[in-house]
Amino acid sequence: MELRHLHYFIAVAEELHFSRAAERLHISQPPLSQQIRDLEEELEVKLFERTKRQVHLTEAGNVFLERSYRVLAQLEQAIAATQRIGRGEVGRLAIGFVGSAMYTVLPEILRAFREQFPAVELQLHELTTAQQIQALHDKQVDVGIVRSAISEPGLSVECFLPESLVLALPETHPLSAQTQVSLSTLADELFVLFPAKMGPVFYEQIIDTCQQAGFRPKVAQEAIQMETIVGLVAAGLGIAIVPASLQNFHRGGVIYRTLKEEIPNTGLYLTWRRHDSLPVVKTFLDLARRTTQGESTCQPTQQSI
């Protein structure tokens, strides 16, 4: 039995007229009559009572019609579900992210994704860049949102949100009276930095920026989370160069100042397994790109590895 036999049978059962059913199916009547006879022979049961003037369903025919409707309905549901999976509209998506991403457009992206694809189960994991790289390799997360342009075999990386760097100072710091601060005036200051092993690219960016101004920063404290860095600045343990989005983290005791020197932007980067075929990953990446479309270019620029 083939699927077409069910369609032929349902057409005849609903029309109770072979000529009208054949016209509806866009075939001629003799092949339709033969297909119904073949179906009855295969089932070893009579589905229709035929006379010269009328066609009626037998009791077996009525039962088969009801079950045929169910089979086709289940098939349509299976097709629809398969297509939705193929379009990335259902499934599970595990996302890793650095904590500071929550002060940028990440909440907006997550809200839009939830509204557009409610059938996708989101699993969120706050992780450092280094932890996200490992989690991607271990297939514990599907997409990472990191703070630097990593270069890692098997992963693709793409900048989707550029961001400037600002200086975080204790509010009682003498430099707080200035609207702009020169890097060269920070040579004797103590710095709070992100650990090199957790985010080497971002760490080196800060070190290189200071060295270009003629000094290497004196590191007093290290902290994994950007919020902790800001908290340590508020406690007077040092100053920090941080992404501008941290200004959305309302923490008393801290002020932010722009830097006079033109320094490279940081940015948020999407990263994923290069050969990942999960449609839901592509769906999320496309939405993230659309959300930040029109933003200026990150430095370093987009790369795929």
Image: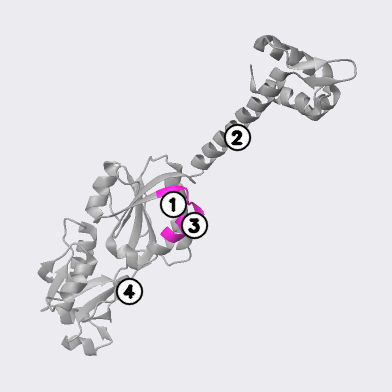
- Dot 4 alpha-carbon crowd within 10 angstroms: few under 14, some 14 to 19, many 20 or more: few
Work out how far the residue at label 1 is from the one at label 4, CA to CA, in angstroms: 24 Å
Q: Provide the secondary structure element on which disc 2 rests.
A: helix
The span picked out in magenta is: 110-121
Residues at marks 4 and 3 touching, judged by CB atoms closer than 8 Å: no
Q: Which residue is at the front of the view, 194 or 8?
A: 8
Residue at 16%, 79% (x, y): give it. Answer: 186
Hey, which residue is sitting farthest bottom in the picture? 177
Q: Is residue 261 above or below residue 150?
A: below
Residue at 80%, 23% (x, y): give it. Answer: 27
Q: Is residue 35 magenta?
A: no
Q: Provide the secondary structure element on which disc 3 rests.
A: helix
Can you identify the residue that label 2 sits on?
76
Q: Is residue 177 visible?
A: yes
Pair 4/2: label in front: 2
Q: Which one is earlier in the sequence, the residue at label 2 or at label 1?
A: 2
Residue 184 appears left or right of 32: left
Q: Amino acid at mark 4?
A: Asn
Work out how far the residue at label 4 is from the one at label 3, CA to CA, in angstroms: 24 Å
Q: Is residue 119 magenta?
A: yes
Q: Amino acid at mark 3?
A: Glu
Residue at 19%, 73% (x, y): give it. Answer: 231
Q: Amino acid at mark 2?
A: Glu
Can you identify the residue that label 1 sits on?
284
Q: How many marks?
A: 4
Pair 2/1: label in front: 2
Q: Which one is earlier in the sequence, the residue at label 3 or at label 2?
A: 2
Numbered label attached to residue 248: 4
Can you identify the residue that label 3 sits on?
115
Q: Which one is earlier in the sequence, the residue at label 3 or at label 1?
A: 3
- Quarter of the image with the N terminus is top right
Q: Provide the secondary structure element on which disc 4 rests.
A: helix
